[in-house]
Image (tube, rainbow, N blue to C red):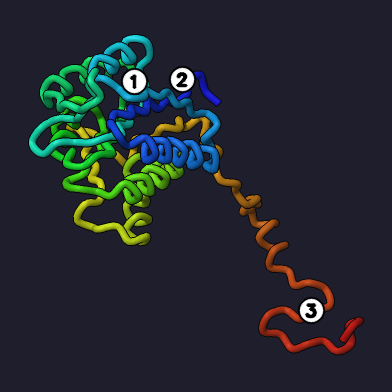
Amino acid sequence: MTDALPPTILLIQAAAGRPVALDEEHRQISMALNRSTYGDIFGIRTLQAARARDLPDQLAREVPMVMHFSGRGTPNSGLRFVTDDGSEAPTSISALCKLLAEYTVDGLGLVVLNACWTVDLAEALSEAVGCVIGTSGPIPDQDAISYSYALYRNLGCGHSVGQSHRRACAEVELLGADERYLPELFAGPGIDADTVFLVDAGSRTPLPQRPHKPHDSNSAARLRKPVVGRPARGAAPRWDLPGW
């Protein structure tokens, strides 16, 4: 382990009238991390029935490594947050980009917009945040939840953001999702998503290596020496040895 801060996921639940789907996604993300190799180092913070003003309040208290939005997007507009009267209202794309850009220096490195019609927002946000995931069209709740499960299971196993995203998309498509509306990953300028990890290198256990013997002349000769009682390769068998 290193002295790096443990990765924290801020789960923003901001869809009015869909408590069952939001609760199920929270359950699936928690389950995915619990079943992953390093899931126990992750922390999850949740904003339920999130208003737009709740986001800056939470970011001021604690900056997560991952911001995961569960809710609805709007074509050609921003994310929809719950309003005080229980309905929803979209937010400004440019305002959200400005807000999140202020927190990248404090560790915000991945934004997951698990909502319909968020691909334009994801591309815009990637200019400020390292890696952003969005969806180009309507995606059924079950497909969105399945993607979240596969994404966080792979991230929790120590895989990179890029690899985790590709594996999650392949898994969801295998389960019958429409390829046209699978989530898309955008990386900011100069960022390679295949080199971005939520589990730091010091926490990832290297794969066990097979014992390696020194290749000096004596050891090489010993390795080539035939076993007593068995013929050397290419030699005729000695029937006079014990056991033959």
Mark 1, secondary structure of its residue: loop
Q: Between label 1 and label 3, give the one nearer the viewer.
A: 1
Of residues 138 and 18, which is closer to you in this image? 18
Of residues 17 and 240, which is closer to you in this image? 17
In contact (CB < 8 Å): disc 2 and disc 1: yes
Mark 2, secondary structure of its residue: loop
Q: Tell me the amino acid under the disc marked 3.
A: Arg
Q: Position of residue 118 (x, y in %)?
A: 18, 38
Check disc 1: other Cα within 10 Å, few if <14, some if 14-19, many if 20+: some
Tell me the number on the disc at residue 230: 3
Could you tell me which residue is drawn at 68 percent across and 80 percent down?
233
Q: Position of residue 37 (x, y in %)?
A: 54, 40
Report the residue marked by disc 2. 5
Q: Tell me the amino acid under the disc marked 2.
A: Leu
Report the residue marked by disc 1. 107
Q: Between label 2 and label 3, give the one nearer the viewer.
A: 2
128 up-or-down from 171: above or below: above
Q: Position of residue 71 (x, y in %)?
A: 27, 34
